[in-house]
Amino acid sequence: MLTSLPSLPGFRLQEYLGSGPSGHVYRARDELYSRDVAVKLLDSRRCTPAGWPRSPAVSP
């Protein structure tokens, strides 16, 4: 589990909710619209063009 919350301009990250294969999810406050949101921060090691699963609709 992560020990500190990252910063993201325009949002106040409040709580770590969980993670999946592509990144981490946080409960956050959207400071522009004053509403609670979920924010997913993608893992740059896994979310690169080479890391995306190949779609059957995309030809090489």
Image: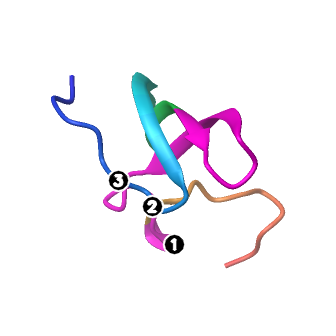
Quarter of the image with the N terminus is top left
Density class for disc 2 (Cα within 10 Å; few <14, some 14-19, many ≥20) is few
Identify residue for label 1.
49
Residue 21 in sight in this render = no
Whole-percent x, y for residue 60 in the image: 67, 79
C-alpha span from label 2 to label 1: 5 Å
Label annotation for residue 38: none
Foreground residue, 45 or 18? 18
Q: Residue at x 75, y 75 (%)?
A: 59
SS for tag 2?
helix
Identify residue for label 2.
51
Density class for disc 3 (Cα within 10 Å; few <14, some 14-19, many ≥20) is few
Foreground residue, 48 or 37? 37
Residue 25 in sight in this render = yes
- Tell me the magenta residue range: 28-50
Q: Is residue 30 magenta?
A: yes
